[in-house]
Amino acid sequence: MAWKPQNDVAMAEIKKIDGFIAQVETDKKDMIYQIGETFFKKYKDSENMDEELKILVDNIKISDTNRKVWINRKMKMQGMRICEGCGNVLPYDSMFCNRCGIKLGPVAEDLVQLKGVAPMMQPPV
Ligand SMILES: [Zn+2]
């Protein structure tokens, strides 16, 4: 027979404890995230890295690239592009930036495949 709380006070206490457990778990996830972020910043350009960690670091860089590609695709649908020099928003077919003056290269519109992940986790083509 399952244990049942005897009264409302016990119920409230259990609910409170559940909240503390959830908070500890959230804090732990935040700390693990911070470890990852610290590692990424410190070692993102390092060649001497454990292969498993190198794949994760590379995939973060690929994800940053793919984020830009998605933004580029969205901007293109609106007839716009972003200057890679200064972030200025320009008409899609601009040759030069009218703010910083650089010659604009082709807009990156190809998604990059992640390393070592299942096909279902890859970005759509
Ligand atoms: Zn510019």
Image (cartoon, rainbow, N blue to C red):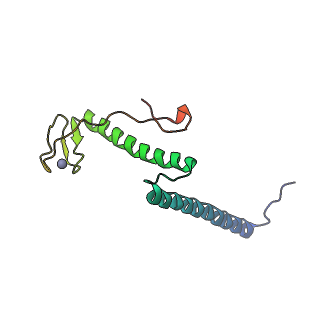
Q: Position of residue 95 (x, y in %)?
A: 14, 37
- In-front residue for pair 86/44: 44
Q: Is residue 9 above or below residue 121?
A: below
Q: Is residue 2 above or below residue 66?
A: below
User: In this image, 48 relative to 24: left or right?
Assistant: left
- Quadrant placement of the C terminus: top left
User: In this image, 33 relative to 18: left or right?
Assistant: left
Q: Position of residue 68 (x, y in %)?
A: 34, 43
How many marks are shown on the rendered structure? 0
- In-front residue for pair 51/59: 51
Query: Residue shown at 56%/47% (left/top)?
Result: 51
User: In this image, 83 relative to 30: left or right?
Assistant: left
Q: Position of residue 58 (x, y in %)?
A: 46, 46
**Which quadrant of the structure image shows residue 13?**
bottom right
Q: Which residue is most to the front?
A: 48
Q: Which residue is most to the top?
A: 125
Q: Position of residue 5 (x, y in %)?
A: 78, 63
Query: Residue shown at 41%/36% (left/top)?
Result: 112
Query: Residue shown at 37%/43% (left/top)?
Result: 65
Query: Residue shown at 49%/35% (left/top)?
Result: 122
**Which quadrant of the structure image shows residue 1?**
bottom right
